[in-house]
Each structure stands twice: as C-alpha cells, then as structure tokens.
Amino acid sequence: MKKLPIQHSRREFITSVSGAGAAMMITPFLALAADKPDTKVAKIVAETMGIDTHNHIDVPFAAAEVPGPDVDLAGEMKRSGLSAICMTFSVDRPELRNPGDGYERFKNGLASMDKILEKNGLKRALNMHDVRDAYKKHQPAIIQSVAGGHFLEGKIERLQEAYSHGLRHLGLLHDNDAIVPLGDVSTNPVRWDGLTAFGADVIRECNRLGILIDWHLPTSGGWLLRSNWQPVQL
C-alpha cells in the first residue's frame, strides 16, 4: 500500500469531522430538493457543508471480483447535494470463520474503492484542509471509513497500514465479534464489560494516528469515554 505521512492537523480533522457529522442531519431536505426543486432549499444546500458520516458502498470480498459493480459516485453525490461522505464498508457479513479472512476482505474492499474513486475522478480526503479545499472548489470529498475493526485480527500495526491507505474513520465494532475480539457487540451477550484490552489499544493507536472512532453498535459507550482522549462520533 502507498505510504502517506501522518498529517500534523490530525486532531483538527477528528474534531471537525465529528462535529460536522453531528450537525449535518439534512437528508430530508436533500430528498425534497431532488424530488421537487425549490430555490430556497437549493440555496441552503449550496451554502452548507453537508457530510454523510456513514455511507455504505457494496464492494466484493474476493480478489477475482474486484472492482465490483459500476458506481456513479460523483453523480450521486452531486444529485444529493452532499459535500462529503464517510465512504464505508463492513467485512463481517457473512460472519467471519477463519483467521485471515477479515484482512483479505478488507484489502479487497479498499482495492475496489480505489477503482471506484479512480473511475469517478475522486480522491480520499486525508485531513480537514482536503475537505475544506474540495468544498471551496465544489468538488466531492471522500473520507475513507470501515465498519468494524475485524481486519486487525490482533495486529495493531495494521492500523498504520490502513492509515497509509487513507483510512480516517473507524467504526470499532459491528454486527459480529472479530477473530480477536475488540469489545461487546450489541448482537451478543456482554462478556468484556464493553471493551477488551486489545480494543483499548486500538482506540489509543487511532488517537495517535488521527483516525476518528465511530461509536457503532456497541452495548454501551462508557468504555469508549474511558479509553479515548480525542473527540468521537456518536
């Protein structure tokens, strides 16, 4: 994977994106604008930096199927009126059974998204300067995300690898337990009082790198606040 340097503005990126995600709940207005054009709504949309903080894109898990279906990402974003999206995918459905499968799915998912971005003439935003610059130029901004840390499989160094590929947003937990568990997911009984030791290590490393933690489908949030010293997305 191409290595990218850690940006000096990583805290600003985390703070700004988490704040924008909480504020930009404008989807109903965008839908209205799409169905029945209204000049007032169009003006609001045009003057607002709207960020969809959890936008799933289906990607294939098998290398032979990369890059997957054709996605008009630039066109869809233009029609929605959104300035940026956290482009995400999950690797734990269907449920993971074997060590290595989560990592393989993650790599193939990123490879698919590389192709989608290339075909649409888009690139990943790596910091808030990139997001603001794209907004000023009326260009879509793509923030790379993944729903679930299943690709880590107990290897904390994979976070640096993912960061170097452009990951800036991580939903720590998802529907199913990881091969090396990170914490209690909402679909299973509580076993770790919210967070495992490895899950806490992952949060600390995300804080260091500048990856925003998304409080996604856990049993509770106290563990996150105890282990995290950076802003989070709720």
Image: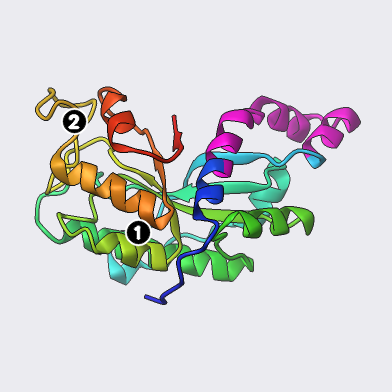
* Magenta stretch: includes residue 19: yes
| Res. 65 image quadrant | bottom left
Up/down of 154 relative to 38, above or below: below
Rounded to the nearest angstrom, the CA distance separating label 1 from label 2 is 27 Å
Q: Secondary structure at mark 1?
A: loop
| Res. 200 image quadrant | top left
Q: Point out the residue furthest to the right here.
A: 39
How far across and down, in percent of the image, does residue 186 sit? 24, 25
Q: Secondary structure at mark 2?
A: loop
* Magenta stretch: includes residue 4: no
How far across and down, in percent of the image, does residue 54 sit? 48, 40
Drawn side of residue 214 relative to residue 95, left or right: right
Up/down of 133 relative to 15, above or below: below
Which label lies toward us, 1 or 2? 2
Magenta stretch bounds: 16-45
**Which quarter of the rendering shows the N terminus?**
bottom left
Q: Residues within 10 Å of mark 2 (few under 14, many from 20)?
A: many
Provide the residue designation for mark 2.
Answer: 184
- Is tag 1's residue or tag 2's residue first in the polypeptide sequence? 1
Q: Is residue 171 among the parts visible in the rendering?
A: yes
Provide the residue designation for mark 1.
Answer: 60
Q: Residue at x 17, y 39 (%)?
A: 177
Q: Is residue 94 among the parts visible in the rendering?
A: no
Q: Pick the residue in front: 92 or 180.
A: 180
Tell me how many marks there are: 2
How far across and down, in percent of the image, does residue 38 sit? 86, 29
Drawn side of residue 234 relative to residue 148, left or right: right
Q: Residue at x 20, y 37 (%)?
A: 176
Q: Main secondary structure of the magenta part?
A: helix
- Which kind of residue does numbered mark 1 sit on? Pro
**Which quarter of the rendering shows the C terminus?**
top left
